Amino acid sequence: MKKFFYLFCMVVGSLWLLFFPPQVAANSTAFTVRTPMPSNSYHNKANSLNILLQKNQKQTINVTIRNLTNDKQTLSVAPRTGYTNNLARIAYNLNDVSKKTNPTIKLGEVLTGPKTITLLPSQTKIVKYYITMPNKNYQGILIGALYFQNIKTADKKNAADKIHKVTLRINVRNQKSKATTANLSVKNTTLTVNHSKNDSPAIKLTLQNVTVEKLSGATLTTSLSQNGNVLYQQTRKNRTIAPKSTFDYFLNLNNQKVKPGNYQLEFKVITKNRTWRYSTPLKISKTQATKINQTATIQNNDNLLWKLSLMAIIIIIFLTYYRPYRRTQR
């Protein structure tokens, strides 16, 4: 009986792994980057450097880099400008952000220091960078980061098991700048396919913050309704939008088939000090719906049921043929 039970469990487990394969997770980092908070910090946060600087002022940033591997590492270091990605978060992973943001001052224009760093196995090194502000007052906030990336790994076999990119965020404010308030607006809305989210049909909102101030701690709620019934709703909390940035934001339709008709799109942004509301009718034609449905990945609601049914059939066949075979062996 035990032998049969173990065999049965093996069959069920194998089928489960076949139809529902596990996801693979990332592993540890290859190096760390740290910097002490200077005396002119205006907000002490462990994951960013926030400093107050006047015009012509120079700031030294001491960066401690530690190699966590037993291999020699060569790192490239580049100043990046923060932009807003389609999840309404500030990101620093792009070299060219000219189509996404147009800040008054970029970090790369005021920062100097080594562009390449070599670390021996398990070595810790302190590297100096300098920020020199221009001879003019500026308003708002400078959003940027030092982007460290491994460009050479001695042991390529273990390279895939390590994370080789680290971002040190740097925010700079002028001590004498006037207080400003971010302002968010919706430029346009379109029906599209969100290729960054399983190729799902989606409503794309092109949003813009034209001010020199970032928007922090925002809650974004988007909904699509028809005849007063909410069909899709999405809420994202604690979002941050970069100054002078334009970005696309998506209400995903969960890989469901798009149907033509008249809809109502609602978009609301809530911060500690202000609330924005946007509402517009949205008409989807038969031609638009057909085009999107042909391009997007549409979820088959019967897919899960089909997998479970197939598993059940295989198990029944196994039980039907195994038991008579077991009796004949006796």
Image (cartoon, rainbow, N blue to C red):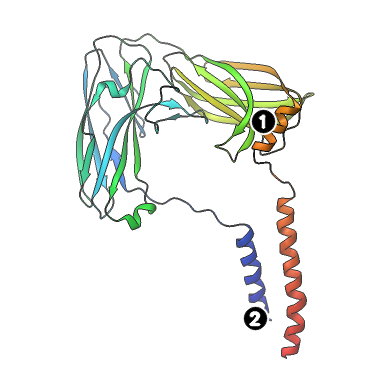
| Front-most of residues 304 and 96 | 96
Q: Quadrant of residue 14?
A: bottom right
Residue marked by disc 1: 233
Which is nearer the eye, 73 or 274? 73
- Residue 41 in view: no
Q: Position of residue 160 (x, y in %)?
A: 38, 52
Give me the residue at 66% from left, 67% from top. Answer: 12
- Would you name the residue on which mark 2 appears? 3
Q: Position of residue 101 (x, y in %)?
A: 43, 20
Identify the image quadrant of residue 327.
bottom right
Q: Quadrant of residue 128?
A: top left
* Residue furthest to the right: 227
Q: Is residue 251 above or below residue 176?
A: below
Picture coordinates of residue 54 (x, y %)? 26, 14
Q: What is the crowding at mark 1: few (fewer than 14 residues within 10 Å), some, or many (at least 20)?
A: some
Up-down: is 227 above or below 258? above
Taking 248 as reference, is 301 left or right? right
